Image: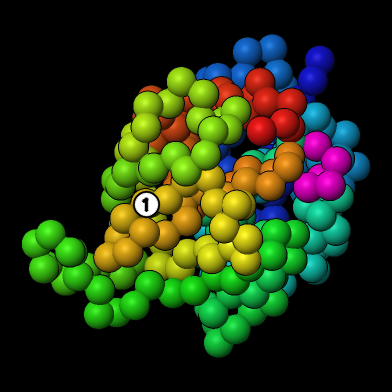
């Protein structure tokens, strides 16, 4: 039986994403683990996260799971979620600057405080919280059967800026267009929470369950 490991490093709503994956996993076994051997024995890996990036990176380094994330990203399908997306890049502006995992080149920056809706002129709140459209920039296996510009659920104050625009798989509008999904080879990561995004989110997770790592 093949399996999906959700990395448990103490920063993520693991119950919600585990339940959502179990709902769509079919015969796949869903495991929540902080054990390197268990995670690297899985066929697919989910890298979630909520909270502050410095705490995320510190905990990954303390437990040695930073090396596990890097090895998984080099060898099998990986899905990053929310803070898990941001941690994949080189650096983040959060916490006065934080070095991240450097798996995908790029940086994480904060939304400007003075942003406003271009249509209404209403000032936008930070964090960006709630439902928003995701425009599919390029075809990808994880977008299969998800209608263009479907809405997903977001909670974040920072967003990814990949060094290579070709790594942007989806964008969303919030005062500006920002990268809400990135992809490179066998790694796909989203800024939104698919486990909280109803039908579209469950479909994305189902696509991940079936994904062989090729775009």
**Furthest residue toward left:** 120
Look at the image and tell me in which quarter the C terminus lies.
Answer: top right
Q: Viewer-proximal residue, 126 or 62?
A: 126
Residue 30 shows in this picture: no
Compared with 57, 185 (above or below) is above
Check the image and tell me how it is coloured.
Answer: rainbow
Tell me the residue at 60%/84% (across/down): 97
Is 175 placed left or right of 39 in the picture? left
Which quadrant of the structure image shows residue 5? top right
Q: Callout 1: few (<14), some (14-19), or many (20+) C-alpha neighbours within 10 Å?
A: many
Compared with 176, 143 (above or below) is above
**Where does residue 34 sit, x and y in percent of width and height?**
77, 48
Residue 123 magenta-highlighted: no
**Where does residue 181 sit, x and y in percent of width and height?**
51, 48
Tell me the residue at 69%/70% (across/down): 90
Is 57 placed left or right of 178 in the picture? right
Q: Viewer-proximal residue, 24 or 180?
A: 180
Is 143 placed left or right of 43 in the picture? left
Compared with 154, 135 (above or below) is above
Residue 75 magenta-highlighted: yes
Residue 175 shows in this picture: yes
**Where does residue 4 sit, x and y in percent of width and height?**
72, 30
**Where does residue 16 sit, x and y in percent of width and height?**
50, 38
Tell me the residue at 44%/74% (across/down): 110
Residue pointed to by mark 1: 172
Span colored in magenta: 72-76
């Amino acid at each position: 039986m093949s399996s999906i490991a959700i990395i448990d490093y103490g920063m993520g709503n693991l119950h919600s994403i585990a339940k959502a994956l179990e709902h769509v996993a079919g015969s796949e076994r869903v495991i929540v683990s902080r054990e390197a051997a268990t995670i690297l024995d899985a066929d697919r890996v989910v890298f979630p996260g909520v909270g502050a990036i410095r705490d995320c990176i510190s905990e990954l380094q303390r437990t040695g799971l930073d090396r596990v994330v890097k090895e998984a990203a080099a060898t099998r399908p990986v899905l990053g979620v929310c803070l898990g997306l941001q941690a994949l890049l080189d650096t983040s502006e959060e916490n006065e600057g934080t070095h991240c995992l450097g798996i995908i080149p790029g940086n994480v920056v904060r939304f400007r405080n003075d942003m406003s809706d271009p249509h209404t002129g209403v000032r936008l709140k930070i964090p960006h919280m709630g439902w928003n459209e995701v425009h599919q920039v390029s075809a990808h296996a994880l977008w299969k059967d998800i209608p263009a510009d479907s809405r997903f659920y977001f909670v974040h104050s920072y967003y990814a800026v990949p060094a290579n625009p070709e790594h942007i798989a989806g964008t969303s509008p919030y005062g500006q267009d920002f990268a809400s999904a990135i992809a490179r080879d066998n790694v796909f990561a989203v800024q939104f929470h698919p486990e909280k995004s109803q039908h579209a989110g469950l479909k994305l997770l189902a696509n991940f369950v079936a994904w062989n790592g090729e775009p």
